Amino acid sequence: MLRVFLGVVVAGLCAMATSCAAQEFRVYTRVWDLSSGDQPVSRSLTLWHAGKIYDVIHSQGEVTILEPSQRRVTIINSDKGVQTSVDFDELKHLLQVAEERLAQQIQTLEAKPNSSKEFSNHLRFQLRPQFTKHYDSQQRRLSLESKTLTYEVRGQEGVRAEAVDSYLEYADWACRLNFVLHPQPVFPTARLELNQQIRKLKLFPLEVKLRAQFDRPLQLKAEHELSWALDNLDRDKIHHWESLLRNPKTQSLTLPEYQRAVLSQTTAKAR
């Protein structure tokens, strides 16, 4: 659920420009549940290298490799020894199917006598989120507010434009992928809208807070540390992941097969 909302907040793929494809950088992300304590509930590392984006949450034993030039996402679960790939068009199709189902659910709900208008409006927000926007240019703080959920972003100006675009496109696709892999009651549309507003302001998000009112109140905060160089450990990790891809012992599965093989151990964990 965490990554659905924040995309690793802040947590993606990108039809990168050529200049960006040769660029290397890393983003380390920590996520807190502000209602449960002062220790991060999730940590992730995202690496940009040789035109690919590697995103790993070590506690999950899973790495996602995004290849913009191939319009493809590959997911490896080292604990299970399995991998799967899905292209961008398939992800979009799966989300479109989910949106059509939600639209039908709304129609069915509203056709019932004494149906809850508040709940119906909540569902409609999932399809077409509407926010009130505020931006403090001096503090580099952006807020998107609604009755359903609110985002607050503290950003940084002056970051290389191609890196900002690459990061936000990565966050877009990661948000879509996480919704498909780990179905949630909240669609990625709100997070995608936030990314678009950040993109317009040419900000790199350093901190993102989310407040939401669903079946229970939700308060999350993600912090991102941006570095412009990969170290030897980063490169060793990339080499290891690429080796897993080539290893004949790593079983290739379809996306539904992968979900059945892996989700039984991850559905109870925060992403």
Image: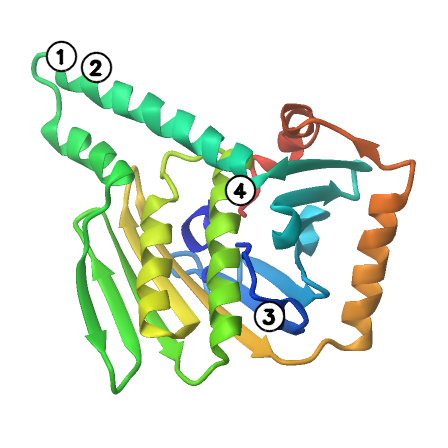
Amino acid at the residue labelled 3: Cys
Q: Which mark is residue 177?
A: 4
Identify residue for label 1. 112
- Which secondary structure, mark 1? loop
Q: Secondary structure at mark 2?
A: helix
Q: Which mark is residue 108?
A: 2
Which numbered disc, 4 or 3, marks the residue that appears first in the sequence? 3
Mark 3 highlights which residue?
Answer: 20
The extreme front residue here reads: 18
User: How much space separates mark 2 and mark 1, taking CA atoms?
Assistant: 7 Å
Residue 218 seen in render: no
- The residues bearing labels 3 and 1 have C-alpha atoms spaced at a distance of 52 Å
Asked whether the residues under the numbered discs 2 and 1 touch, taking CB atoms below 8 Å apart as contact, a structural biologist would say yes
Q: Is residue 28 above or below residue 214?
A: below
Visible residue check, residue 9: yes
Rendered residue at 88%/51% (across/down): 243
Of residues 68 and 123, which is closer to you in this image?
68
Element under disc 4: helix
**With respect to residue 102, does 23 lie above or below?**
below
Kind of residue sitting beneath label 4: Leu
The type of residue carrying mark 2 is Thr
